[in-house]
Amino acid sequence: MSATAKSVAKPLLLTNIGQLLTLKDITGRNEPRRGRELLELGIIENAAIFCREGKIAAVGSEVAIGARATQEIGSDLRVFDCRGGTVLPGFVDSHTHPVFVSPRLVDFEQRIQGSTYEQIANAGGGIRSSIERVRKASEDDLVSAVLRAFEDMERSGTTTIEAKSGYGLSLDSELKSLRSIREAAQQWPGTVISTFLGAHVIPPEFQQRADEYVDLVCEEMIPKVAKEKLADFVDVFCERGAFSIAQTERIFAAAQKARMGTRAHVCQFTPQDLSRLARFEPASYDHLDCLTDKDLQSLAQQRTIATLLPGASYFLAHSYAIARRLIDAGAAVALATDFNPGTSPTTSMPIVLSMACTQMRMTPAEAISAATINGAHALRLAKRKGSIEMGKEADLAVFDIRDYREICYWFGRETCRATVMNGHLAIH
Ligand code: NIG
Ligand code: FE
């Protein structure tokens, strides 16, 4: 573990913030943002933030906060000049798959030549082609791969990451994957939530015996993962060619029994009837590119977060989720990278926000709320993360821009200058 990774952070004062987006709770109820609430960024001009012991100790106008911080701490204080830039809560990337060994370049070229994601998967490529190398990899190699992904994400302003297993698909290699997430998380100053995705696809040795694999997931894998406290959530790829709604129900029931939260990849390529999953109150449904009208209306009434992943639509040249209709109907929308080797090889939340604006017609303000406070709700972390308020954890992203809308406007141009993770400053 590096010296700073999980140690208590020194006092830190961020000064000269041109635009500070606090995302302060306007509902007063710690509820996810819906509809017009997504537009309220809680902006303070000419601001400063004082962080102590990894938390936000004070936030407000430059004059008031600066004086208070120096008074309290004297010369032991680290001061970072934001040079008139924009500061917002660090992004909460609530959907990533970082435990893999190599990019999937063969799939990439096959798709360019006209094969679809599903055709490649049915021919034994896709997720299955990532399994062999993860099974053979040492835990150390996986830790290095995961840590590199975390550090790349951090450089684009991400401070909290949800990380899934799902390329091992045997008891041992799934446990190895989750342990590698845990170890990488120890070495990184940001915050990691881990998710068990043993139900990603049916592994080759269980072909034609899908239900037996579901038995293994429910009866052996989930209890073992829970016992070792290796994951907070259980995820399922619920899709034609992966797991059915009935199988997802069984897996969710096992997760509930093990007192783990649930979430699912749904409606990425085909519509599904989500009403059968509602009783599990999943933390999020992710993708939703082919959502039915009925499910859209019912999702708007639920606490489950609708996590949209435009990176996957872009990379597969596939249809985008109907963000506008979801927001206008009142669903609580979040945005995440879906970082993975098959459908979304990006670690950059700013690029995802750009796609959300240009391809899904979200406004920059909606995209930023979706990528911060609603991402925190998707991970059930909103009491600690996702906004800049006194007492919350000091997770910040400092951008070298004058106006927050530039985060969504530039694409592929890295403007994130520094991040603060649990009070630890990292300058890029
Ligand atoms: O979120 N759709 C399922 N899981 C990933 C893809 C994983 C892969 O192709 O390696 C996704 O898009
Ligand atoms: Fe995914």
Image (spheres, grey):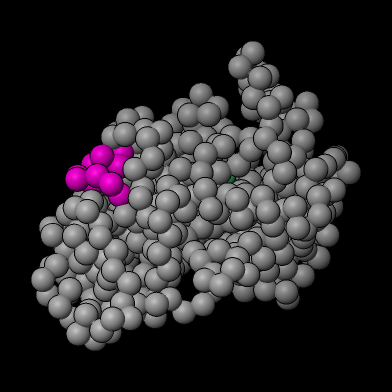
Q: Is residue 174 left or right of residue 164?
A: right
For the point 63% across and 62% down, the residue is 184
Q: Position of residue 204 (x, y in %)?
A: 85, 40
The answer to whether residue 145 of the structure is visible from this angle is yes
Q: Position of residue 167 (x, y in %)?
A: 73, 47
Q: Residue furthest bottom?
A: 72
Above or below, 155 against 424 in this view is: above
Q: Which residues are magenta?
A: 399-408
**Residue 404 sits inside the magenta stretch:** yes
Q: Position of residue 214 (x, y in %)?
A: 77, 54
For the point 54% across and 69% down, the residue is 5
**Residue 389 sits inside the magenta stretch:** no
For the point 46% across and 43% down, the residue is 348
Image quarter of residue 412: top left
Above or below, 39 against 279 in this view is: above
Q: How many marks?
A: 0
Q: Position of residue 166 (x, y in %)?
A: 70, 50
For the point 27% across and 84% down, the residue is 73
Q: Is residue 161 left or right of residue 331?
A: right
Q: Is residue 118 left or right of residue 7?
A: right
